[in-house]
Image (cartoon, rainbow, N blue to C red):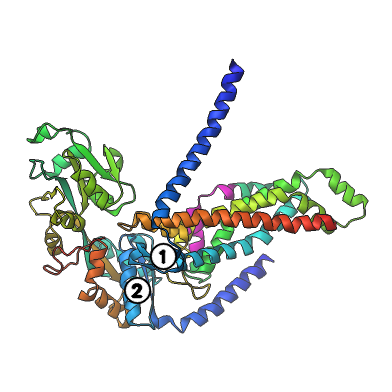
Amino acid sequence: MIKALASAIVLLSAVLNLALAQADNRQLTLTGSSTIAPLAMEIAKRYESQHPDVRIDVQMGGSSRGINDTRMGLADIGMVSRPLKSTEQDLTPFQIAMDGIGIILHKSNAVTALSDAQIIDIYTGKINNWQKLGAADLPITVVNKAEGRSTLELFLHYFSLKNSQIKAQVVIGENQQGIKTVAGNPGAIGYVSIGTAEYEQALGTPIKLLPMAGQVATVASVAQGAYPLSRQLNLVVKAKPEGLVKNFINFAQSAEVKDLIVAQFFVAPFSNSIKSGVAGE
Amino acid sequence: MAERIFSWLIMVCALLVVAALLWVLSDVVLQGAAHFSWQFLFDAPTDAGRGGGIAPILVSTLWLLLIALTVALPLGLGVAIWLSEFASSNSRFANSTGITLDILAGVPSIVYGLFGNAFFSIYLGLGFSLLSGGLTLACMILPVFVRTCEVGLRTVSNDWRRGALALGMTRSTAIWHILLPAARPAIVAGLILSIGRATAETAALLFTSGYVDRMPGSLLDSGRALAVHIYDLAMNVTGGDGAAYASALVLVTLIIVLNTLAQSLVDSWFKRRLVLA
């Protein structure tokens, strides 16, 4: 009985596969990083609208899954939100965007720069007053991101911290929320996506972005690759891209999708390309 | 005095639970209503889900649920009947089946997701599709459904079985016309638990039915479930919280509607039969 059922399913799926196979060359599958997935989906939708015969499925599951699926041929293109490691040189990366985060303080704070060690001390609770850093006598309000946010991962990774070590007074979800919290609290320190922060700063919100390791925190600096607290958002492929794969990657790297990259609060990886043009919500 | 403190404590427990439930519900309703409109139900999502609606996602969710229930209900009811009526109570096989079901009921759903991905998506070649998602959900809800129905059937008094026997009823007639209708409350409970679990599932579906938010054209298309959509909006999409709350409101409403529907359906179906019998 169970055997018959199983073979029925196998037979059915074989038939269905055959039906699907005919459309295969006009279909693309992308899997990988959940950070890139929403952006890739938007790019895919725009590509589909220009090429109605093409179907692009975007699946998520993390960068390492993207690499695995691409290697095994389960996906045509993998999405990886970091540079490829030395063990992953069998794949070819194509960068489509950058993600940078900036440390923000209230505009009235006299501190103009913090070293990595000072930021670690603040976030682990060893320094809890701005006086120790040469500013006014004001307790520090540490603003951290909620679990699951990609900016949190990047922040923890850069400073080699664990989330359990961080002693935060405020835990926030969105970039906008972080900016509002810091703007309304002269003693607060937080970190948000640079695109969002620059946009808010230009609107006159009382925040300031701190330079990291001597590099100014601007979208342009992230785009040039100079700013350290940033990461690449890559599409990876196994073989030399051809046909549809090649066309789609070219499209994802072209100027036609810049507004989509900006709308997802990422940075297009070319200098002068978008400057401070962050789309409003 | 001790008696009074005891009853007071019990009352506080009940209040706490009700308050927590009301808090969650009112949060979802208040925040969700701000972003909700009727158009939200009929539009496709735009701008990574921040704009537009959830029409394709709602359709995918209903397909997933339909597949899961179509597979799990007959199979589950069959196993429950076998366990309670046919297997002898001290048989090794029946015991180990029972224990296996209990263990399976406690397995985290992400494990079902990985199994579904490995078996349905890759081994059977169904890929990321509504079919592999629905079948994975069926595997996931089976143990709970079987156990609830089995317990329901067992609690039916043996007098009913003897009565049926005395009237010369065959075993199948007795089960169909006497025992199943008598176990109705348990079957309804099992159904409601299953629907709730399947509709609210994220982890098992992420790797089986997938992430694509296009309107599904066939059961072999990938389709995003509501819970996956909410997860994505809340975790990956900056500025997606409004749409996430509105989707959560739809999800809660959907579960309530489906449960009411299931209850009345099972009720009317069995009531008619009891009268006939």
SS category of the residue bearing label 2 = helix
Tell me what residue is drawn at x 55 percent, y 75 percent: A13
The amino acid type, in three-letter code, at marker 1 is Gly
Residue A89 showing in the rendered view: no
Q: Position of residue B164 (x, y in %)?
A: 88, 51
Q: Which of the numbered marks, if any, corresponds to residue A114? A: none
> Three-letter amino acid code at disc 2?
Lys
Q: In the figure, is residue B55 to the left or right of A169?
A: right
Q: Residue furthest top?
A: B1
Say if A280 sits above or below A171 in the image.
below
Q: Residue at x 17, y 48 (%)?
A: A103
Residue B254 visible within the image: yes
Q: Read off the residue under disc 2.
A: A45
Q: Residue A4 falls in which quadrant of the image?
A: bottom right
Q: Secondary structure at mark 1?
A: loop
> Where residue A70 sits: x, y (%)?
35, 69
Q: Which residues are magenta?
A: B103-119
Residue at mark 2: chain: A
Q: Residue at x 27, y 49 (%)?
A: A177
Q: Does B33 appear above or below A22?
A: above
Q: Which residue is mark 1?
A: B53
Q: Is residue A194 above or below residue B89?
A: below
Q: Main secondary structure of the magenta part?
A: helix
